[in-house]
Amino acid sequence: MRLIVHDGSMLIKDEIKIKVRSKIKELEKETDAKIGVMNADTELALKKIKDGILLDAGKRADVECKRINAQTNVEMNRMMLDAREEIISDVVSVAMNELESRGPLKFRDELRRLLMMGVNACSADRLLILGNKGTLDVFDPACLDAVKKEAGRDVRFEKDVRKMGAGIVLWDEGNDMFLDYSFDGIFRSREDEIRTGVSRILFG
C-alpha cells in the first residue's frame, strides 16, 4: 500500500478557488443589481426627457393653435365687417337711387323746408337758389313768393340750372358762401348717422 502525504497546499488552493468562485458570483449579483438599477434609472431619465419633449411640443402646439385661431377669428371678423359695409353701401345706394327716381315733385314739401332752413342759416339779404331743372321746376313763382315773404329777403333762382342731383344749394352772394342742401350733400354730412341707422335695421 502506497501512502501519499499532502503538505496541505492543495487544500488551501481548493479553498481559495471556492472562495474566489463565491466572490465572483457575489460580484456578478451586485453588478447585475447595479446594472438593473442603472437601467431603471436610465429608462426613468429617458422617460422624463421624452415626457418633457412631448410636453414642450404640446405646449408649443397649443400656443400655435391659439395663435392660428386668434388670427382666423380676426380675419373672419374683418371679412364679416367688410361684407356688412358692402351690404350697407348697396342699401344706401339703392335708397339714394330710389329717391332720385321719384322726382322732385314727390319731395316738394321737403325741398321747401330745406330752402327755408338754408335761408334762415344765411345772414345775407340776397340769396341764389342753385339746382337742377327738375328741382327748380318745383318752385313755381307762387311758391318762391311765399318763401320770399316768409324769409323777408330777396331769394331768387340762378339763371343757369346745374347738373346735380336732387335738392338745392344756396349761394350767399354777399359772403360768397354756399350751403349744400342737396340730397348728396345731406347724405355726406350725415353719412355716419345714416349708415349706423341702416346697420341697426339690417343687423340689429
Image: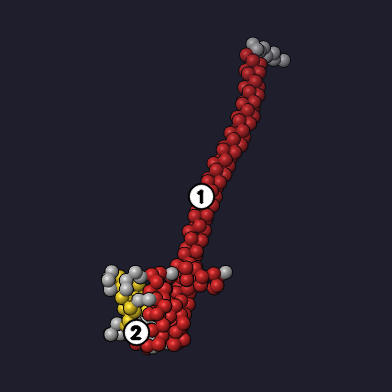
Residue 36 visible in rendering: yes
**Residue 60 circle label:** 1
Q: Percent x, y for residue 155?
A: 34, 79
Q: CA gap, disc 2 to disc 1?
A: 67 Å
Identified at 35% across, 72% down, the residue is: 179
Q: Is residue 37 above or below residue 168?
A: above
Mark 2 or 1: in front is 2
Q: Return the residue found at the far right.
A: 1
Q: Percent x, y for residue 65?
A: 52, 55
Three-letter amino acid code at the position of disc 1: Arg
Few, some or many C-alpha atoms within 10 Å of disc 1 (few <14, some 14-19, many ≥20)?
Answer: few
Q: Earlier in the sequence, mark 2 or mark 1?
A: 1
Few, some or many C-alpha atoms within 10 Å of disc 2 (few <14, some 14-19, many ≥20)?
Answer: some
Total numbered labels placed on residues in the image: 2
Residue 178 visible in rendering: no
Three-letter amino acid code at the position of disc 2: Asn
Q: How is the image coloured?
A: secondary structure
> Horizontal placement of 49 versus 134: left or right?
right
Q: Dot 2: what SS? A: loop
Closer to us: 173 or 136: 173
